[in-house]
Image (spheres, coloured by chain):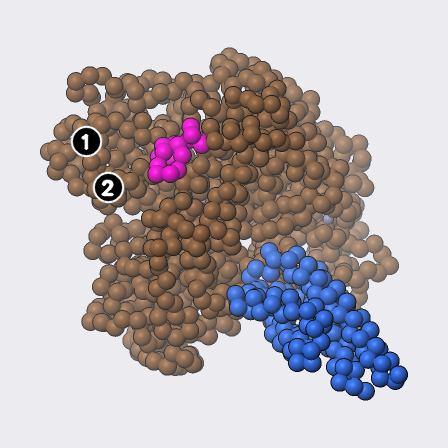
Chain colours: A blue, B brown
């Protein structure tokens, strides 16, 4: 397998991981709405994932940059910028006191991210298969 | 009590504090579930679990034989009996309302102009007879508001007394026949003089369909001081609500104080608590007994539930009881004594932890001495009915000073901790002292403390570490922490910087100053809520102290913030104000470890909560302590079409009283539904609406920009006026020279203007951020009774007040008629009083006659008078006595701990004070802010310029 093959294999796994994180977020939010979890516990739980998720995604994007995968880089750059901006303005963490006011926003954001990771997942898969085919030829 | 039947054998129920509901556990299998377990027999409606052994009434056979039979037709007959016209709720303020004859004579009133004679005018006119008729009696004139009956479709409320009487008769007739639509009265706002007494009117009457209520008790529906809705006739669809542009919400003051003359909340002591087994609503006067009285139908979710047998059996006397006399079926507001299932732990004792700033600024301003003296004097007033109350004092400057007194000891030992990074308690015991056991030691300590730090010259405040120590001290119990600080926290966790920057004031960046500068206070608040700790802030600043950031702690822990800018105890006015308010807060019967849940009828949802609470779930508010007289605003969403003739909102406040009793205060509000937009408009409660909008504006100014908050408010008003014009007036979508609104909302535009001009929201580059933040904190917590004067001050003309004003009448001291808030009313020879519940201005005209100066101030002439904070002398002449009586009345007539300071303002005195007083006159133009007339013109242009459909 070539570099591109390995890279996209890693990207597929990474996207799957990010995908599951988002699913977890969404489940937690609906748990909050159904009163299965209190906002303090919810925020404590989710906040442990916020930075790792952003860092992991940024790392993946960095790999694309280093390996010159311009399309993949182009797809991921906006999300990196978005995460960066949120971290800079110190609004990346979930705030237990405000969570009910902002819940619909958070849910929307998580759903969009979910869709984004899903698309990425298939794109990486496609690229990986492409890489494998070109290799076997 | 038919306890053990209620759960299948082997099941127990455990109250879950975190979720505010029961966890049902099968002891055999250890299986747990949220839903009540169901077994073969139909569930007992009162699924409140019982593990106690049943009372004497348990034997079902005798109970049933003695049970009253409720045949369907009998029940029906009973409902028929409830056909009486619902009695309107009592007037919203417990102060006498002056002026007779209803609003009819209101339009004609032009006080202050009578004394406009030439030469040396008399400074008080003894004859203004128009105010004498029945002015003393509280409210009867307004009990018959002009929006019922009579009048033409666009009639201004100018019907005479005769017409009034007719409409009164008409109403009782209609009432007997059934529900009658609201009469809508359209008023033109432009060019119509304002009568401030409009604000004292009760909200539009709640007209429930006949038979909705089981009881004929006038208290069967919620008193507006406990719970009021912005709309007293709920639209059946959300599209109708959206069309009207009215914000739908509830204003809630569940823990309202009981003042003299108030009906206390009745207490149900037999722990028979009937609740709906589906929605968990409490039984109330709006349920329906069905199935021969054996079952009741929930008015919130239509679930059929079984009536507890003890409703018909008196456990104490062992004889049949009359269920119709049960308190919860006759009163909207009731307290239930909660049985042990409502506790996760034994009821918490009241715990007070004082964090006292002893830095140089605090000591030199006299705050420390005044505070310790007030605590000492309040020891007897602290709630301590069962001798469980505990007290701790931690003093802080650059280090933490703990005071330890052994039980029964008389000497306190001071322990100093100067490690601020890792706060620890120097001693495991004796820091939190039992008040009764160690009273002598505590008294000795408090007596000494005023002088103990007299020589302190330390600068710096470790408030954050002190808070951490306080949290550690009472994390296992829960407590009320009271912080008294005179300086900006500068050391350890939660240290703040002086971020006051005059350049950003009045700009878009200003709202950053209203947001928290440090996350410490918000994060601590979250821990506090978990540990049942509520924090009060008393702030005394000679300079910037960042009220905005510090207020976050009280905001999320259901506490309160009190601010005394430039406090100096050598000025007796300052010392008295603080001592009074602090004393009131200490003496108030707070509720502990509380949760509030508001349940609406099916089809509606609580969407947003405003006020000093922590939202713990979509419908659950957590309050470590419930302060007295704090208000919460809740927005309501209509999710499904409502197809019942009336809907019910029920607020349940589960709390521990200071006496160590677990109680549930239930307040039920029933409102009719309507599918008619004109009925919707005519039922709008403008007072509740502005309370809700004030809360929203404050939040918006913090999360967005100040400008956005103001714009949103004006846009809301424009939308309402525009829609009203299009749907309710003949002008339709065309241009109109009039600006119309229904009669019951005619003060609303002025209230909006008052809010726009309020210190908390005003467009200005002059308002210090601390004052701004404090004003916003008040706007977000004051109950309507205090909020309305805060945004629309009361203005009295004293020199020409009618002779009975200031004397004792039926409802206490008689107040003069309030004047419209415009400086046109200020006369050069006059004496005026402007008050907003937080400050009182005594305005003295520059041509005040010497006699007036002698009578009121004991000074020979106007020139001798000095403006500023002062205490008015009580002199031996009738006029002085009357003025003093009015000031005293103004200070005590409202709820809440506040004691306004009196400022004497000379017409040609120092400009800042003069401008401050004049800024209360909100109908005037000020700087760039429009006058009321200009504002109306702007609104009219906007309404005419845009199309509303
Ligand atoms: Zn129900």
Residue B703 in the magenta stretch? The answer is no
Q: Which residue lies furthest to the front in this view?
A: A137
The answer to whether residue A69 is left or right of residue B411 is right
The residue drawn where x is 50% and y is 61% is B557
* Residue carrying label 2: B911
Is residue A24 visible in the rendered image? The answer is no
**Residue farthest to the right, as pictured:** A137
**Residue B846: which numbered mark, if any?**
1
State the SS at label 1: loop
Q: How far apart are marks 1 and 2 (CA)?
A: 14 Å
The span shown in magenta is B920-936
In this image, B84 relative to B891: left or right? right
Q: Looking at the image, is B923 positioned above or below residue B628?
A: above
Secondary structure of the residue carrying tag 2 is helix
Q: Quadrant of residue B106?
A: top left
Q: Is the magenta stretch mostly helix, strand or loop?
A: loop
- Residue B274 coordinates in the image, percent (x, y): 69, 51
Lateral position of residue B582 relative to residue B317, left or right: left
Foreground of the two, B582 or B184: B184
Residue drawn at (81%, 87%) of the image: A1
């Amino acid at each position: 397998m070539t570099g591109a093959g390995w890279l996209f294999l890693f990207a597929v796994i990474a996207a799957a991981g990010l995908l599951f994180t988002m699913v977890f977020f969404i489940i937690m939010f609906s748990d909050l709405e159904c009163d299965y979890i209190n906002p303090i516990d919810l925020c404590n739980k989710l906040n442990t994932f916020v930075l790792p998720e952003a860092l992991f995604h940024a790392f993946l994007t960095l790999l694309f940059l280093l390996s010159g995968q311009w399309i993949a880089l182009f797809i991921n750059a906006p999300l990196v910028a978005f995460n960066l901006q949120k971290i800079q303005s110190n609004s990346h963490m979930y705030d237990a006191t405000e969570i009910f006011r902002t819940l619909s926003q958070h849910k929307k954001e998580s759903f969009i991210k979910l869709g984004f990771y899903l698309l990425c997942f298939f794109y990486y898969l496609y690229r990986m298969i492409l890489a494998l085919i070109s290799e076997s030829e | 009590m038919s306890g053990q039947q209620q759960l299948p054998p082997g099941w127990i129920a455990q109250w879950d504090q975190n979720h505010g509901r029961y966890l049902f556990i099968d002891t055999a299998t250890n299986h747990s579930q949220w839903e009540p377990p169901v077994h073969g027999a139909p569930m007992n409606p009162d699924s409140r679990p019982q593990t106690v052994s049943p009372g004497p009434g348990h034997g079902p056979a005798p109970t049933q034989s003695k049970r009253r039979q409720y045949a369907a037709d009998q029940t029906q007959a009973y409902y028929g009996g409830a056909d009486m016209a619902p009695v309107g709720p009592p007037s919203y303020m417990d102060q006498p309302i002056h002026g007779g004859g209803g609003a009819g004579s209101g339009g004609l009133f032009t006080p202050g102009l009578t004394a406009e004679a030439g030469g040396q005018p008399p400074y008080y006119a003894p004859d203004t007879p128009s105010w004498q008729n029945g002015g003393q009696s509280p409210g009867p004139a307004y009990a018959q508001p002009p929006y019922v009956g009579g009048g033409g479709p666009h009639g201004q409320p100018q019907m005479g007394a005769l017409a009034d009487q007719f409409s009164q008769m008409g109403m009782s007739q209609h009432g007997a026949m059934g529900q009658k639509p609201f009469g809508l009265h359209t008023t033109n706002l432009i060019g119509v003089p304002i009568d401030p007494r409009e604000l004292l009117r009760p909200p539009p009457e709640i007209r429930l369909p006949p038979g909705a209520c089981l009881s004929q008790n006038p208290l069967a529906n919620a008193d507006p001081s406990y719970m009021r809705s912005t709309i007293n006739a709920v639209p059946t669809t959300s599209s109708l609500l959206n069309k009207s542009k009215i914000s739908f919400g509830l204003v809630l003051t569940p823990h309202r104080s009981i003042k003299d003359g108030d009906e206390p909340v009745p207490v149900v002591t037999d722990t028979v608590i009937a609740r709906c087994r589906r929605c968990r609503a409490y039984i109330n006067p709006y349920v329906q007994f069905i199935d021969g009285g054996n079952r009741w139908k929930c008015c919130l979710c239509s679930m059929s539930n079984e009536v507890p047998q003890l409703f018909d059996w008196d456990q104490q006397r062992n004889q049949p009881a009359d269920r119709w006399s049960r308190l919860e079926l006759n009163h909207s507001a009731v307290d239930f004594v909660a049985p042990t299932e409502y506790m996760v732990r034994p009821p918490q004792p009241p715990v007070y932890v004082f964090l006292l700033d002893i830095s140089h600024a605090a000591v030199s301003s006299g705050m420390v001495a005044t505070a310790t003296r007030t605590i000492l004097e309040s020891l007897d007033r602290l709630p301590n009915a069962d001798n469980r109350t505990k007290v701790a004092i931690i003093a802080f400057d650059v280090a933490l000073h703990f005071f330890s007194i052994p039980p029964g000891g008389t000497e306190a030992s001071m322990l100093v901790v100067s490690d601020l990074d890792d706060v620890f308690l120097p001693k495991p015991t004796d820091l939190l002292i039992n008040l009764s056991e160690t009273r002598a030691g505590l008294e000795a300590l408090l007596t000494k403390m005023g002088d103990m730090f007299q020589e302190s010259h330390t600068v710096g405040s470790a408030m954050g570490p002190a808070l951490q120590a306080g949290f550690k001290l009472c994390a296992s119990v829960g407590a009320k922490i009271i912080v008294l600080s005179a300086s900006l926290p500068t050391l350890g966790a939660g240290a703040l910087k002086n971020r006051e920057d005059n350049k950003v004031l009045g700009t878009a960046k200003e709202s950053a100053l209203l947001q928290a500068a440090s996350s410490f206070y918000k994060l601590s608040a979250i821990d506090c809520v978990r540990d049942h700790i509520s924090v009060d802030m008393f702030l005394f600043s000679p300079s910037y102290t960042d009220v905005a950031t510090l207020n976050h702690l009280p905001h999320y822990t259901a506490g309160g913030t009190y601010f005394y800018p430039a406090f100096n105890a050598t000025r007796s006015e300052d010392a008295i104000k603080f001592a009074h308010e602090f004393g009131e807060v200490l003496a108030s019967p707070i509720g502990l470890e509380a949760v509030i849940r508001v349940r609406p009828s099916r089809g509606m949802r609580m969407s947003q909560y405003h006020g000093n609470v922590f939202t713990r779930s979509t419908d659950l508010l957590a309050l470590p302590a419930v302060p007295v007289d704090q208000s919460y605003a809740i927005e309501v969403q209509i999710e499904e079409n409502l197809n019942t003739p009336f809907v019910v909102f029920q607020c349940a406040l589960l709390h521990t009283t200071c006496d160590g009793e677990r109680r549930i205060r239930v307040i039920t509000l029933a409102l009719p539904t309507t599918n008619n937009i004109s009925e919707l408009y005519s039922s709008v409660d403008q007072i509740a609406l502005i309370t809700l909008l004030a809360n929203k504006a404050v939040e918006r100014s913090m999360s967005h920009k100040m400008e956005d908050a103001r714009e949103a408010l004006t846009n809301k008003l424009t939308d309402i006026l525009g829609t009203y014009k299009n749907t309710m007036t003949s002008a339709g979508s065309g241009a109109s020279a009039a600006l119309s609104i229904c009669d019951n909302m005619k003060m609303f535009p002025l209230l909006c203007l008052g809010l726009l001009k309020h210190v908390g929201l005003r467009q200005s580059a002059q308002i210090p951020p601390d004052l701004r933040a404090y004003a916003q904190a008040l706007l977000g917590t004051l109950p309507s009774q205090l909020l309305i004067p805060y945004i629309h001050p009361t203005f009295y003309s004293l020199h020409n007040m009618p002779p009975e004003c200031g004397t004792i009448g039926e409802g206490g001291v008689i107040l003069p008629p309030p004047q419209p808030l415009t400086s046109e009313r200020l006369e050069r020879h006059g004496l005026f009083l402007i008050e907003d519940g937080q400050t009182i201005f005594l305005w003295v005209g520059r041509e005040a006659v010497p006699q007036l100066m002698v009578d009121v101030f004991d000074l020979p002439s106007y020139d001798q008078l000095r403006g500023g904070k002062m205490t008015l002398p009580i002199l031996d002449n009738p006029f002085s006595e009357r003025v003093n009586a009015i000031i005293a009345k103004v200070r005590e007539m409202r709820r809440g701990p506040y004691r306004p300071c009196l400022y004497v303002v000379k017409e040609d005195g120092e400009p800042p004070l003069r401008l401050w007083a004049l800024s209360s006159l909100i109908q005037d133009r000020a700087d760039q802010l429009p006058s009321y007339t200009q504002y109306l013109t702007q609104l009219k242009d906007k309404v005419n310029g845009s199309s509303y459909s």
